[in-house]
Amino acid sequence: MKRLHSLLCLSSLAISSFACAPQETEEEMLQRTAVDVRIPIPAPDPKFVDFVGSELIIKPGEDAMICTHQPFAGEDVAYDLADPQQGKFGHHFIIVKAKKPLPAGTVEDCSKPEDMAKYDLLAIPSFELPAGHAFMLRKGSPIVMQSHYVNTGKTPIRIRDLLRFRRVDASKVKTWAAPFATNMAFFEIKPGQSGTLSYDCEVPKDYKLMMTGGHMHEWGKKYVLSYAATPADTMKDLNRVDEWMAHYRDEPPTLVKKASPMDLPKGTILRTECNWFNDTKDTLMFPHEMCSTFGVVVGSQDPWLCVGDK
């Protein structure tokens, strides 16, 4: 009887301890189970200017657009390649600058269409300039690393992106180049329907066009960039993709004129047209789908961004 009493006491103690044990929070569970897809931090290299993104957790099924502020404290740098690196499930990585700079390391959600108004264009990723050409990264540039992740896996992921600018000797630069982009973030494509968006941008100064391409996502069907000397003139195709493929999201067809850049006089009208088909049950909006043109012009150090009207 005494032994039975002791066993009952031990059982009660065990049950009581289990019931009172602290429950794991969602944050603790995410930290414990997250799969590491962080980009390794490279050793310091004088050939590069590096910016390391914040470490964040992306939940399973989460579609997240995150902006990390990384002001550039160094002196002016000439570079010929901006290399943004993402881990698994990285969707895209855009390099912009804040109109209202925030402290270094500040992280904010930037997934709403109206959030794009907070930023200006800074760099075009992954385009390597020919010898003798360079972009300029200016001292004090309020760099923002805009990372888009779509975690289609079944477990959370731990991310940390990396941005590298490859230096060149400014004294050897013969021709300066600058990025440009156009964007329209206000559109909706209803479930089971097609949608078309067209918007114009006026070239602000005399340029020469070295490269241009388009950006849409998986639901894109056709992309066209056309141009005309004035709004009254007939538009001519510049870059036309009649059958947009899903993998063009990451590797779009581009028009490249490194050897003989094309004249793009001030006042030229650039028209971006995107066509989609929404085969989902939800309305497609930015940033799940996009309609942008990007490129590189020569004869300027200043990036140009055109945001289409609503």
Image: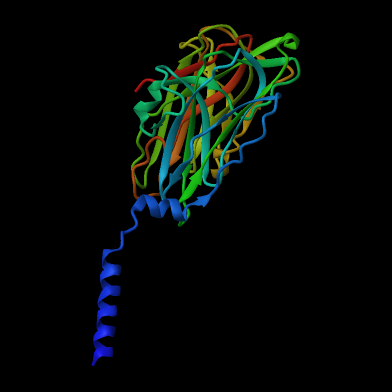
Q: Which of 235 and 159 is in front in this view?
A: 159
Residue 134's quadrant in the figure?
top right
Residue 116's quadrant in the figure?
top left
Q: In the image, residue 50 lies at what x, y percent? A: 61, 28
Task: Please give left or right for residue 144 compared with residue 17 in the image.
Answer: right
Residue 177's quadrant in the figure?
top right
Residue 219 appears in the rendering = no
Q: In the image, residue 96 lies at what x, y percent? A: 49, 23
**Where is the C terminus found, in terms of image quarters?**
top left
Q: How many labels does the image show?
A: 0
Q: Which of 169 and 4 is in front in this view?
A: 4
Q: Nearer the viewer, residue 274 or 109?
A: 109
- Classify 267 as above or below 17: above
Task: Please give left or right for residue 300 compared with residue 173 in the image.
Answer: left
Q: Residue furthest bottom?
A: 1
Q: In the image, residue 181 lies at what x, y percent? A: 52, 22
**Where is the N terminus found, in terms of image quarters?**
bottom left
Task: Please give left or right for residue 206 compared with residue 287 in the image.
Answer: right
- Classify 154 as above or below 89: below
- Classify 162 as above or below 175: below
Query: Which residue is found at the position 54% from the left and 17% from the top?
Result: 73
Query: Which residue is found at the position 68% from the left and 26% from the top?
Result: 128
Q: Nearer the viewer, residue 38 or 254?
A: 38
Residue 42 appears in the rendering = yes
Task: Please give left or right for residue 115 compared with residue 85 in the image.
Answer: left
- Classify 162 as above or below 48: below
Rendered image coloring scheme: rainbow
Q: In the image, residue 282 lies at what x, y percent? A: 34, 46
Query: Which residue is found at the position 25% from the left and 70% from the top?
Result: 16
